[in-house]
Amino acid sequence: MAMSLLIRLATPADAAAVARLNADFNDVQTAVEEMAARIARCTVTERIFLAEIDGLAVGFLSLWLFPTVCAPDPYAEVAELFVEEAYRRRGIGRALLEAAIEEARLEGASAIKLNTGFRNTAAQRLYFALGFHNLALHLARSTTTQEPIL
């Protein structure tokens, strides 16, 4: 049976699906009303793409887009990318990334960046296949301790 995949921008009406997917991905519980408010508040600088199969949300991507002082073009970064485990390896992550790349291009960004874990080799293969390359070492720390962020 062929799946019917739809990639689209999320709206506040999709808050329940985005909250569920984000909880699965980041283990962050967010009330639906709060997620709806965040989606509405962030539309200028962040786009949330949903991947739906036959109407069921099975993945999402968060794309940051904003102007910067130090560059003439807007900055674009894939901040989050998640596909439910049961739906992986079906081209859904690729479709989400392709939609984000096109949106960044349409918004005037000359490049798009993303970060991933050193051990996330499956995601790295996808990113390299789509033309991403190693740019730098990305470092992070807590603002309250000097413990590493994992």
Image: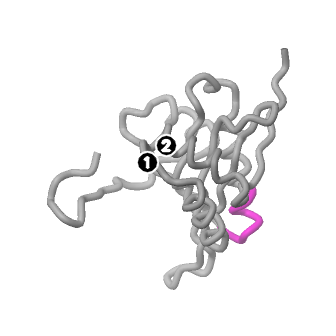
Distance, label 2 to label 1, CA atoms, is 5 Å
Q: Classify 3 as above or below 105.
A: above
Q: Residue 64: percent from the left, percent from the top?
A: 58, 64
Tell me if 145 is positioned left or right of 51 in this view. Answer: left
As drawn, 28 above or below 75: above
Going 80% across and 40% down the picture, which residue do you hit? Answer: 6
Query: Which residue in the rendered view is the most extreme toward the top?
Result: 1
Q: Quadrant of residue 119?
A: top left
Mark 2, Cα crowd under 10 Å, few <14 / some 14-19 / many 20+, is few
Question: Does 51 appear in magenta?
Answer: no
Residue 122 located left or right of residue 49: left
> What is the number of the mark on residue 23?
2
Looking at this view, is 88 or 32 the one in front?
Answer: 32
Q: Position of residue 3 (x, y in %)?
A: 81, 24
Q: Is residue 86 above or below residue 34?
A: above
Q: Residue at x 59, y 60 (%)?
A: 33
Q: Magenta region, mostly helix, strand or loop?
A: helix
What kind of element bears circle 1? loop
Q: Position of residue 86 (x, y in %)?
A: 60, 22
- Specify the amino acid type for callout 1: Val
Q: Which residue is mark 1?
A: 28
Residue 94: x %, y % from top left = 67, 38
Q: Point out the stretch of residues depicted in magenta.
A: 102-109
